Image (tube, coloured by chain):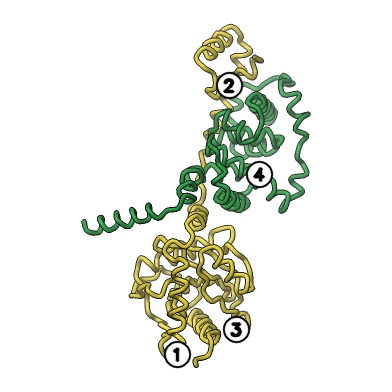
Chain colours: A yellow, B green
């Protein structure tokens, strides 16, 4: 074999025992070859030192994991119960829907939601589907995680839709809508209505608001100030209330 | 203790209900996600683009996991990332792809001896990350991908051959050429 090719195989540990012995003999006999082999070893060392293995970003891993496990805790069946609770909501009317401003969520859940929001801010794209058209976002959620929360168009109120993404909350994929509030971003995650909403501390710099409606419990996370976020939450709630079929 | 038990039974339930595709995906894709990302980073030269490429690759891998027919799962996933990166580059950065080299002519003179006096090993070891990165980026694409698979993904010649579809002998000669070019360039920059 061409000694230069042989050197690659030796460097990469691809020679068998007999080949390795033959190569060692060659190296011992040929000073130029030995020098060349030292250069290759030096290159190997300098490459490994400078480029330690980089791991895939955690957010990327989470996104892919969410796609691999579609609709685990939140499946087609929930879509039916959602339809059922929607019907119930119609009967009960708006009175049953409480905008729980100021109600603060459980600590673990708040952290998970804020983490999801932060990760998205850091990621290449805050959304998995970028669209200001709710007619694109809802089918996308339906196709990916078999659940599609209402995605009201709030552009007229000053909160344009940016898109949607899938967060992983308490081990289950959760649809999250992303809106813009001036220079801020708000993430609205729709969780099954059964999710608790007990007080919890919010990390400094973030505000979290929770309300219920349409069989979901909505959680808005943003670094916008509290009054602005409340304004957004009211607009969102009003729009989803109006979108429901009128009571009979 | 109660908590542990219920966590266990929940985990069992999850295992029981996992579909074939999910298990296959966990076996073939999840362990090699870091490899896929690392490879895509070198191929696209950008962390942002690498994320896009890897995500798309994993979706493809997920839908095609039934087609995996043994061999090295890492080579299989890297091959998907490689194809996805090509189409992704063609769609989003066609200009960079226009530089694609003539593989045959590149491979043909693969055993050519170095033309200039070679640097001492100590000179090579003084190269810094930026210099190495630029030198690797300038390699012809077929050399670069082979080098990256070998040095940064720690793939065997057989795995690289599987992922690229080139014979093992070609893998070896591409590595020889890639390393020769890097050494030559580092010697020039440091002298």
Q: Pick the quarter of the image with the N terminus of chain B.
A: bottom left
Q: Pick the quarter of the image with the C terminus of chain B.
A: top right
Q: Along the horizontal axis of the image, is B93 left or right of A206?
A: right
Q: What element carries label 3?
A: helix
Label 3 neighbourhood size at 10 Å, few (<14), some (14-19), many (20+)? Answer: few
* Badge nearest the viewer, 4 or 3: 4
Label 1 neighbourhood size at 10 Å, few (<14), some (14-19), many (20+)? Answer: some
Chain of the residue where label 3 is placed in the rendered structure: A
Residue indicated by mark 2: A9
How far, Cα to Cα, is label 2 from label 1?
75 Å
Return the mark for residue B83: 4
How far, Cα to Cα, is label 4 from label 3?
44 Å
Q: Which tag, 2 or 3, sits closer to the chain's start? A: 2
Q: Along the horizontal axis of the image, is B119 left or right of A218?
A: right
Chain of the residue where label 4 is placed in the rendered structure: B
Residue nearest the observer in this picture, A109 or A201: A109
The image shows residue B163 at horizontal and vertical percentages of 61, 36
Determine the residue positioned at 66% across, 44% down. B83
Q: In this view of the protein, can residue A50 be seen by the observer? A: no
Of all residues shown, which one is farthest toward the top?
Answer: A29
Residue indicated by mark 1: A93
User: Is the Cβ of the residue at disc 4 closer than 8 Å to that at disc 3?
Assistant: no
Q: Which tag, 1 or 3, sits closer to the chain's start? A: 1
* Badge nearest the viewer, 4 or 2: 4
């Amino acid at each position: 074999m061409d000694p230069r090719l042989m050197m690659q195989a030796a460097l990469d540990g691809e020679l068998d025992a007999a080949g390795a012995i033959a190569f060692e003999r060659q190296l011992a006999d040929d000073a130029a070859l030995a020098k060349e082999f030292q250069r290759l070893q030096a290159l190997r060392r300098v490459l490994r030192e400078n480029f330690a293995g980089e791991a895939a970003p955690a957010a990327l891993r989470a996104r892919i994991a969410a796609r691999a496990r579609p609709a685990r805790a939140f499946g087609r069946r929930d879509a039916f119960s959602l339809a059922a609770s929607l019907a119930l909501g119609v009967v009960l009317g708006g009175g049953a829907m409480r905008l729980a401003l100021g109600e603060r969520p459980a600590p673990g859940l708040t952290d998970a939601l804020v983490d999801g929001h932060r990760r998205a801010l850091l990621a290449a794209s805050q959304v998995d589907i970028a669209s200001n058209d709710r007619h694109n976002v809802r089918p996308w959620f339906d196709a990916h995680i078999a659940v599609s929360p209402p995605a009201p168009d709030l552009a007229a109120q000053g909160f344009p839709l940016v898109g949607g993404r899938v967060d992983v909350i308490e081990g289950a994929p959760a649809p999250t809508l992303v809106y813009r509030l001036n220079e801020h971003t708000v993430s609205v995650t729709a969780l099954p209505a059964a999710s608790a909403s007990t007080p919890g501390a919010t990390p400094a710099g973030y505000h979290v608001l929770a309300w219920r409606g349409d069989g979901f419990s909505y959680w808005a996370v943003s670094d916008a100030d509290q009054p602005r976020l409340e304004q957004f939450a009211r607009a969102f709630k009003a729009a989803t209330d109006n979108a429901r079929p009128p009571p009979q | 203790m109660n908590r542990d038990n219920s966590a266990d039974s929940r985990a069992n339930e999850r295992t029981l209900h996992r579909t074939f595709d999910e298990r296959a995906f966990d076996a073939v894709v999840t362990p090699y996600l870091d490899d896929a990302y690392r490879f895509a980073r070198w191929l696209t030269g950008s962390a942002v683009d690498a994320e896009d490429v890897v995500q798309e690759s994993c979706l493809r891998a997920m839908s095609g996991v039934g087609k995996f027919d043994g061999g090295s799962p890492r080579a299989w996933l890297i091959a998907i990332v490689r194809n996805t990166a090509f189409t992704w580059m063609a769609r989003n950065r066609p200009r960079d792809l226009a530089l694609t080299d003539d593989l045959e002519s590149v491979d043909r003179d693969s055993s050519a001896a170095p033309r200039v006096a070679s640097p001492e090993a100590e000179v090579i070891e003084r190269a810094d990350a930026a210099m190495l990165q630029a030198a690797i980026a300038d390699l012809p694409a077929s050399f670069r991908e082979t080098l990256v698979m070998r040095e940064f993904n720690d793939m065997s010649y057989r795995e690289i051959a599987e992922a690229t579809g080139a014979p093992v002998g070609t893998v070896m000669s591409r590595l020889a050429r890639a390393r020769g070019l890097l050494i030559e360039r580092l010697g020039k920059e440091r002298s």
